[in-house]
């Protein structure tokens, strides 16, 4: 296959060229020819998206089909351990479902019972092929909140074992206290949920995590940062020589807290909650200046439904789909805000792939897997849930005007979506 005449985003300056694909791999990048098999003239050719943060296991076939349609050719999904199940057993159980995936799929082990986590568990995960392990500093009510000791010890062990520790940074104890404050004041609705999870509870946990990672002399990956203050902390830590990988999620870049003023605000509940425009703009500053490294979707194939039964916000489900819209919406808004194509490719594909040791994808270089997307910046469309493929009747992005359309998605040299090979 020859992908002809597109503007190829290679990591250096984009240049027009043909991509020669052979046996599922990029064989060469050559000077542009005048059209041919897969005509990409007038379009941008980017590496297939790599989504570092998803929760797809409750519907892997649909979630990964949606990913592929939206330009994502590699998905990292979190395991979902059952009560009492070891992290390794949860991994092995998830692996049995992976043949359902229609794009490349890797797992991140989620630790939901951190008090039982042992060094042997981490060694087993490494032996199973994990490149990461995820801890939560929130959700004490679910027994999921890692203690400072567990976080520190896991960071220490991670260096030796070659596992990157991913941390959900929110101070769970303070959230519990603030939940009670909200309820005591009669704030039982969405506003109470959002106020309990104010940016300060994230920033405290980011500061603590960075301090412990510094003590442990370990790199650390911070998931779904949503606050301007968190990015300040990341910059300070890096200035001290720490290796920090900072992730934002697409909804925090594309939506804001005004969604909670809509007639059906509960649909936009997510953790961390959507923030004010000030924070949205600060995250885009982080996209521009390199503070942020990766953009995930935090796609929830099904919303998280708390076990709590009651008439206040503690019973509300949270989380929403986003695996299919991540690449097109971030490309659209990124271009509108003047972010370079190289930078967007890095956030959406190259850096997630490298961070989690999938060096064979995420970049358009000879020898890499032919995971590509052809993006036509000249067209416009409007997000409509009936056009999406994840099996959801609703999307948080309904009605958003999008610049540029993904015309073709190629995975391992085969067309997943778009015009068939002539
Ligand atoms: Zn998540």
Image: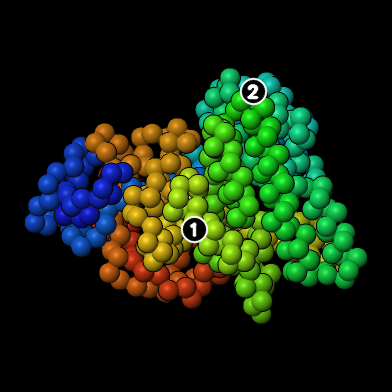
* Residue 291 percent coordinates (x, y): 50, 47
* Residue 234 percent coordinates (x, y): 58, 43
* Residue 274 percent coordinates (x, y): 63, 63
Question: Which residue is located at x 58 percent, y 67 percent?
Answer: 277
- Label 1 sits on residue: 284
Q: Earlier in the sequence, mark 1 or mark 2?
A: 2
| Residue 326 against residue 397 in the figure, above or below | above
Question: Which residue is located at x 47 percent, y 73 percent?
Answer: 400
Q: Residues within 10 Å of mark 2 (few under 14, many from 20)?
A: some
SS at circle 1 = helix
Question: Which residue is located at x 18 percent, y 39 percent?
Answer: 28
Report the quarter where the C terminus lies: bottom left
Q: Is residue 14 left or right of residue 171?
A: left
Mark 1–mark 2 distance (CA, rounded to whole Å): 34 Å
Q: Residue furthest left?
A: 34
143 or 102: which is nearer to us? Answer: 143
84 or 74: which is nearer to us? Answer: 74
- Label 2 sits on residue: 157
SS at circle 2 = helix
């Amino acid at each position: 296959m020859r992908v002809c005449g597109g503007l190829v985003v290679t990591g250096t300056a984009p240049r027009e060229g043909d991509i020669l694909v052979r046996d599922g791999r990029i064989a060469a990048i050559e000077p542009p020819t005048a059209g041919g098999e897969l005509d990409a003239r007038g379009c941008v050719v980017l590496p297939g998206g790599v989504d570092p943060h998803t929760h797809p296991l409750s519907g892997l076939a649909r979630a990964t089909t949606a990913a592929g349609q939206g330009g994502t050719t590699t998905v990292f999904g979190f395991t979902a351990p059952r009560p009492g199940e070891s992290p390794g057993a949860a991994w092995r159980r998830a692996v049995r479902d992976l043949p359902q995936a229609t794009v490349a799929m890797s797992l991140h082990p989620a630790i939901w019972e951190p008090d039982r986590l042992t060094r042997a568990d981490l060694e087993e995960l490494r032996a199973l092929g994990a490149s990461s392990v995820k801890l939560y500093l929130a959700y004490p009510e679910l027994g999921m909140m890692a203690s400072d000791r567990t976080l520190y010890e896991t960071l220490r062990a991670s260096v030796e074992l070659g596992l990157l520790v991913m941390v959900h940074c929110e101070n769970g104890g303070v959230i519990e206290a603030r939940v009670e404050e909200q309820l005591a004041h009669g704030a039982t609705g969405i506003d109470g949920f959002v106020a309990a999870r104010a940016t300060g509870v994230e920033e405290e946990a980011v500061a603590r995590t960075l301090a412990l990672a510094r003590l442990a002399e370990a790199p650390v990956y911070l998931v779904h940062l949503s606050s301007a203050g968190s990015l300040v902390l990341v910059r300070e830590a890096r200035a001290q020589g720490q290796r920090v990988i900072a992730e934002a999620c697409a909804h925090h870049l594309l939506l804001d807290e005004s969604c909670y003023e809509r007639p059906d605000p509960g649909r936009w509940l997510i953790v961390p909650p959507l923030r004010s425009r000030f924070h949205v703009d600060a995250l885009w500053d982080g996209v521009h200046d390199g503070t942020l490294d990766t953009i995930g979707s935090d796609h929830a194939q099904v919303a998280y439904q708390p076990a709590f039964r009651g008439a206040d916000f503690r019973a509300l489900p949270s989380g929403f789909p986003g695996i299919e819209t991540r690449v097109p919406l971030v490309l659209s808004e990124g271009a509108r805000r003047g972010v370079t194509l190289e930078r967007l490719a890095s956030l959406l594909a190259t850096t997630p792939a490298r961070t989690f040791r999938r060096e064979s994808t995420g970049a358009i270089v000879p020898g890499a897997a032919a995971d590509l997307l052809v993006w036509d910046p000249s067209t416009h469309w409007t997000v409509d849930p009936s056009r999406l493929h994840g099996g959801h009747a609703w999307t948080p992005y309904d009605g958003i005007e999008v610049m540029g359309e993904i015309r073709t998605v190629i995975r391992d040299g085969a067309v997943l979506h778009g015009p068939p090979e002539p």
